[in-house]
Image (cartoon, rainbow, N blue to C red):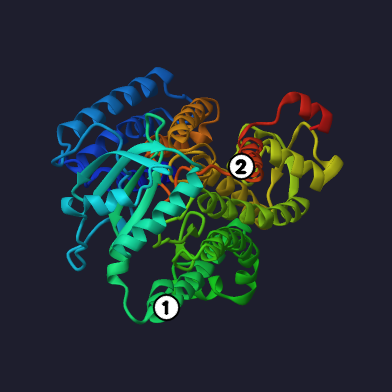
Amino acid sequence: MEFWFLFLLLLGLATYLMVQHSVAQITRTPVWLLWLVLMTPALLLIGWMLMYGAKQPPPVALFMWSLFICIVFYWILFQWGRRVPPNTQTDEAPAPASESQPITQPTAETTVRPIEPREETQLRNCFPWSVYYVQNIEYRPQAVICRGQLRTKASNAYQQIKANIEAQFGDRFLLIFQEGFNGKPFFVLVPNTQAAKQTDTPQSDQQQLTRPGLALLLLLATLVTTTLVGVDIAGVSLPQTSDIGSLLKTLFSLDVLLKGLPYALGLMAILGTHELGHYLTARFYNIRSTLPYFIPVPFFLGTFGAFIQMRSPIPNRKALFDISIAGPFAGFVVTLPILIWGLAHSDVVALTEKTRLLNPDALNPKYSILLAILSKLALGSQLTAKSALDLHPVAVAGFLGLVVTALNLMPVGQLDGGHIIHAMFGQRTAIVIGQIARVLLLLLSLVREEFLLWAIILLFMPLVDEPALNDVTELDNKRDIWGLLSMALLIVIVLPLPQAIANFLQI
């Protein structure tokens, strides 16, 4: 009962935040109504579980039909209340900005003068016919779109036209180079509100952006909450007493806390290294970004993870790729030794009906190809075909590191994997790959119910990713190979161990 209540609470919160972030500004339909429609399939499933228990699984038709009807109803409500701005066209347009790219949204405090029609001659002079032949200029409320024919390499065209724009208009505009859905790239000029807000004290501005005091406070708070959760994972039995003071004294005693620290330090090392990978790579490309901020919670895993915010536009697909892949790979490098050490100190138990993917007391390693291989490497002949794992707290942290790596590598929307696919193949292909990935994960959740929550969250995650300033120039072969390796890593984490490999490993 408590598990399903927590499941519903977390799912409801995540769904509401996604709806509010993605569609609240472009539809008049109340957010709570859209949220209720999206939550209906989950409410039906949880209601079934509460009535009939986990031993009687709900009919697949109930879930699929409710999911289909709610998606259609959600789309109808969204379109019914959609705000249609003036002078909009059905042709492609630049993607709306979000928190990581606030510079494309003018504010009341800083009004940046858009380009005027009388300046069109200056604008056209910025596009040499031998580089990019402009055929049409569209004036939008917050952008000017220049469409035409590319006559040279994309990277050379962007650099030359960017220099021409800066020479004519200074820092009034940011120049975006995007792929069109018709296959023809186009340029977009958007007001550079960030340049208008800059002051004469950039150092203090950077200090205010990073906010090291807040980052340190959240780090310490998360260390406390993950340690307390680690105490429970370590199996420390607390005295049964109604005296809160005595209970807290026991809980915060040095001996008890030391038993919770291995899990806490392992998990925070993985999450922190993941975000530091993003942060340091962003700084390498001179992108303004915050320090990693942890999210402490006194239950669940002890944390909801960590995050950084980038306050500058990403210059090109190369930078987008490097920043995106640095986090999962850095976290995975730390995860491997932590997980192997934890598995080596875990206990081997017999397979039972309670053996599940997310049960640390009886985990079946064959639910994941990589986990099975690492378990066999760490435990050797102790691990057999009828064995499950009672994970050491450090192994729990390492296993969660695998889960975090796989979740972030999913090639959907604004996840790291979505950024990677976007950088490799472009926006249009990334949308198709993201849709296929969501459907495949949903089908996998019908076999492995542990993926259901994950599949539902990804199902409603927007597929459109934010463009880089130069979103046309393709990656080199070396980065393409690293991108394919990241997708291979996702596959070996998520897919169950094939029987042929299990026979070879004798598990």
Q: Which sits in the foreground, 495 or 281?
A: 281
Q: Check disc 1 and give the amino acid type.
A: Gln
Q: Which residue is mark 2?
A: 483
Residue found 65% across the figure and 34% down from its top: 367
Q: Is residue 435 visible?
A: yes
- Earlier-in-chain disc, 1 versus 2: 1
SS category of the residue bearing label 2:
helix
In this rendering, the count of numbered labels is 2
Instruction: Left or right? Give the position of 184 relative to 385.
Output: left
Residue found 84% across the figure and 43% down from its top: 380
SS category of the residue bearing label 1:
helix
Q: Which sits in the foreground, 179 or 53?
A: 179
Instruction: Left or right? Give the position of 108 relative to 8.
Output: left
Looking at the image, the residue that sits furthest to the top is 61
Looking at the image, the residue that sits furthest to the left is 86
Location of the N terminus (image quadrant): top left
Q: Which sits in the foreground, 391 or 404?
A: 404
Q: Is residue 237 visible?
A: no
Give the CA separation, mark 1 to mark 2: 34 Å
Residue 7 rendering spot, x and y as whole percentages: 41, 43
Q: Which residue is mark 1?
A: 207
Location of the C terminus (image quadrant): top right
Q: Check disc 2 and give the amino acid type.
A: Gly
Residue 230 rendering spot, x and y as whole percentages: 58, 61
Residue found 44% across the figure and 53% down from its top: 160
Residue 88 rendering spot, x and y as whole percentages: 19, 38
Residue 216 rendering spot, x and y as whole percentages: 49, 75
Q: Quadrant of residue 3?
A: top left
Residue count near mark 2 (Cα–Cα under 10 Å), binned few <14, some 14–19, many ≥20: many
Is residue 68 shown above or below 347? Answer: above
Instruction: Left or right? Give the position of 79 relative to 253.
Output: left
